[in-house]
Image (cartoon, rainbow, N blue to C red):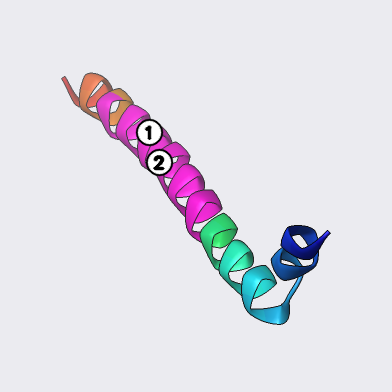
Amino acid sequence: MSDFSRLHTSDGVCILDVQLIITMAGYFSRKILAKVMEQSKFLKIMEN
């Protein structure tokens, strides 16, 4: 039980939240980047 309670200290929760936010931000930025790349390719095709 000592390990479990240690995981739920304010510091532990804060660290977990930061890691989660960084992970989510990385995931969404990759998705957005992929969409932008697709659109720019599409625009280049339209220009030709």
Query: In the image, what residue type sits under mark 1?
Result: Ala
Indicate whether 28 appears above or below 19.
Answer: above
Q: Residue at x 28, y 34 (%)?
A: 40
Q: Residue at x 35, y 27 (%)?
A: 38
Which quadrant of the rendered structure holds the C terminus? top left
Q: Are marks 2 and 1 in contact (CB under 8 Å)?
A: yes
Query: In the image, what residue type sits under mark 2?
Result: Arg
Magenta range is 22-41
Of residues 9 and 43, the one nearer the viewer is 9
Measured from the top left, where is residue 24 in percent x and y?
Answer: 55, 51
Labelled disc at residue 2: none
Graded by Cα atoms within 10 Å as few (under 14), some (14 to 19) or many (20 or more), the crowding at tag 1 reads few
Of residues 47 and 35, the one nearer the viewer is 35
- For disc 1, the marked residue is 34
Q: Residue at x 36, y 32 (%)?
A: 39
Splitting the image into 4 quarters, where does residue 30 fall?
top left
Of residues 45 and 15, the one nearer the viewer is 15
Question: Along the horizontal axis of the image, is 40 left or right of 11?
Answer: left
Measured from the top left, where is residue 7 in percent x and y?
Answer: 71, 64
Q: Residue at x 72, y 69 (%)?
A: 6
- What is the secondary structure assignment of the residue under circle 2? helix
Is the magenta region chiefly helix, strand or loop? helix
Of residues 38 and 25, the one nearer the viewer is 25
Labelled disc at residue 30: 2
Graded by Cα atoms within 10 Å as few (under 14), some (14 to 19) or many (20 or more), the crowding at tag 2 reads few
Question: Along the horizontal axis of the image, is 27 left or right of 43?
Answer: right
